[in-house]
Image: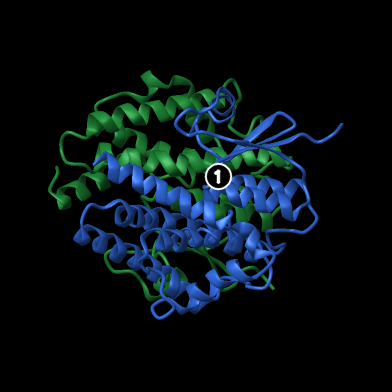
Amino acid sequence: MADEIVLLSIWPSMFGMRVRVALAEKGLKYEYKEEDLQNKSPLLLMMNPVHKKIPVLIHNGKPISESMIIVEYIDEVWNHKSPLLPTDPYQRAQARFWADYVDKKLYDIGKKIIWSIKGEEETGKKEFIECLKLLEGELGDNPYFGGENFGFVDVSLVTFSCWFHTYESYGNFSIETECPKLVAWTKRCLEKESVSSSLADPHKIHNFASGVRKRLGIE
Amino acid sequence: MAEEVKLFGKWISPFSRRIEVALKLKGVEYEYIEEDLFNKSPALLNYNPVHKKIPVLVHNGKPIAESLVIMEYIDETWKHNPILPIDPFEKAMARFWAKFIDDKFWAIWPAVKKAMTSGGEKEREEGIEEAQLHLNTLETQLKEKKFFGGERLGFVEISASLIIWVVVSQEVMGVEILTQEKFPALHKLTQKFVDDDVFKQCVPPWEPLVAYFKDQLGALAASK
């Protein structure tokens, strides 16, 4: 029986994009369903009743939620190509640690830059740059966080890169100036088909963010 | 080469405790180092420079931080008595629920602390209500999904032992929060951590734990 894979997401979500990258890395065909978060589909509410959030992966009718849990699931089920996690338990732990760090820090700090009322952007910007610098340090001289190969941590972080232009614009700073190695890494990742085909256009993201800000009354 | 396993922890911390449970279930011998979180050791700061928190597991000199990450590492390194399911979907579910419980705890515990350390009756009531709101979410999920296999102490059950700390706070305050009436499923689970010989491992020594939090309360009250 052919695998039936459905992804529920919204196009600007860096979390949904992570799943797209993972699916593309594995060469998997899937049905993509765009959700409207102001009007969530019955399918989404049924498949993620706990959080009612995207992304949700539905594999042969069974739903999995939380983007990095989904990515790990994809890596385990379709382990025939492009392994995202290394085989060594210690290296796996390090990869999970850093993906967890991206999850815990980047999104919430980034929110201060883009979605907050005036005043919080400076603190947000400072913390955001500190996070990126720490990650840049962790990358070191490796081509990817996964070492020689694109891996789990790369997936967790690269999808934020299409939001960089938006963070920069509202925070009034240049990520390339602050973290040149990290930006070089994003460009390297974008050379991969799985990444370039999964990430949204940075200018479209900026327009999207602008629209949300207007709706929130902060533009 | 002999295994060298060290755990930097805090005996009152559920996150530290769960690592001890995992190591015990695997029969792994380890050296335990109790940290003073107001005076963190240079070793801890060296092993977890990013978060500077416990627990940190150090295996043959190599550090791992973040309790759920450590638990997966333990399960993958010492493969007997598996803590996580083998099936990828079941594994994904276990990871989901463990994360859910952890996230909920960080909503419940501040509310409980607020109730424990509050100056007035009103604030205490507010704290309790807030805690119960989040406990209700857990209760609903527990009843509907039966996310605990229940019989074996696995990844999700070990994570869920966080609930015991709410029960501890009840005894400290002399107030009921997790009542059998309002939270029958959660209550049944907490009983398991009290009655079952294996599940009991998740709970630190009860009397000293209660005494510790009573002391903390006393110190706070005295400083007000």
Would you call the spot at circle 1 few (<14 residues within 10 Å), some (14-19), or many (20 or more)? some
* Position above or below: A159 against A177: below
On the image, the x and y values in percent for residue A104 come to: 43, 43
* Position above or below: A46 against B6: below
The colour with which the image depicts chain B is: blue
What residue is shown at x 28% (from left), y 24% (from top)? A173
What residue is shown at x 39% (from left), y 22% (from top)? A176
On the image, the x and y values in percent for residue A192 come to: 56, 38
On the image, the x and y values in percent for residue B126 come to: 24, 62
* Position above or below: A8 against A71: below
> Looking at the figure, which quarter contains the C terminus of chain B?
top left
Pointer 1 chain: A
**Front residue of B167 and B87:** B167
Q: Is B55 positioned to the left or the right of B5 in the image?
A: left
> What's the residue type where badge 1 is placed?
Ser
Judging from the image, what secondary structure is the residue with disc 1 in?
A: helix
Q: Which chain is green?
A: A
> Looking at the figure, which quarter contains the N terminus of chain B?
top right
What residue is shown at x 51% (from left), y 58% (from top)? B162
**Front residue of B200 and A70:** B200
Q: Is residue A152 visible?
A: no
On the image, the x and y values in percent for residue B60 come to: 75, 31
The residue singled out by tag 1 in the image is A194
